[in-house]
Image (spheres, rainbow, N blue to C red):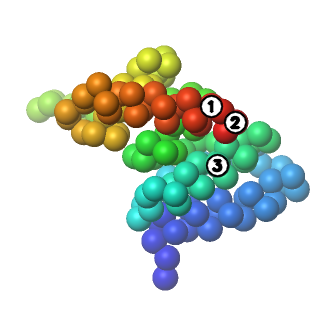
Amino acid sequence: MASGGELSRIMLALRTVLASEDDIHTLIFDEIDTGISGRTAQSVAEKLNLLSKNHQVICITHLPQIAAMADHHFVIEKFSDEESTRTTIKELAEEEMIDELSRLLSGEAITDAVRENAAEMRRLAKAKK
């Protein structure tokens, strides 16, 4: 038995090993962050970055360690009223990405310290690339 997150991480491991041998252009990872945090999340982010050198990687995540490594960051929101449900997707500019990383780190109360932490995460991720 394996959870969706565990299966995604197994697929990440396999794809990392087989990256130079396969003919798959786009890899999609959903729930890859389930049940992990901290250093493990950083390791997953680094593996995703490695895969992105030869593949398009799409990753749905709620962890700032993984999101900070993204080349492009999108926010997807769902809105419902009595008549319909709409989903929007928006690509974020760099400053908006820092705002979103701050929200992932802190929730509602985004202080200057949280924002500085998010900006530092982003700088470290860029340096790692």
Marks 3,1: beta carbons within 8 A = no
Residue hosting label 2: 129
Please name the residue shown 19% across and 33% down the image.
109
**C-alpha separation, residue under disc 2 versus residue under disc 1:** 5 Å
Q: Is residue 35 above or below residue 74?
A: below
Q: Quadrant of the C terminus?
A: top right
The image position of residue 44, as x and y in percent, is: 58, 55
Give the distance between the C-alpha atoms of the residues marked 3 and 2, in whole angstroms: 8 Å
Amino acid beneath label 1 = Lys
Compared across the picture, whether 63 is left or right of 123 comes to left
Q: Position of residue 46 (x, y in %)?
A: 64, 49
Q: Secondary structure at mark 3?
A: helix
Counting from the top left corner in percent of width and height, residue 95 is at 44, 17
The three-letter amino acid code for the residue at tag 2 is Lys
SS of the residue at dot 1?
helix
Is the Cβ of the residue at disc 2 closer than 8 Å to that at disc 1? Answer: yes
Q: Is residue 4 visible?
A: yes
Residue 9 x/y as whole percent: 58, 63
Q: Quadrant of residue 21?
A: bottom right
Q: Residue at x 53, y 60 (%)?
A: 40
The residue at the point 41 percent across, 65 percent down is 35
Residue corresponding to mark 3: 46
Query: Quarter-wise, where is residue 105 in the image?
Result: top left
Whether residue 74 is visible to the viewer of this picture, yes or no, is: no
Q: Which residue appears farthest toward the bottom when viewing the image?
A: 1
Horizontal relation, residue 52 to residue 40: left or right: right
Q: Is residue 34 above or below residue 104?
A: below
According to the picture, the residue beneath numbered tag 1 turns out to be 126
Q: Residue at x 72, y 47 (%)?
A: 51
Looking at the rendered structure, the secondary structure element under dot 2 is loop
* Closer-to-camera residue (123/70): 123
- What amino acid is found at the position of numbered circle 3 in the picture? Glu
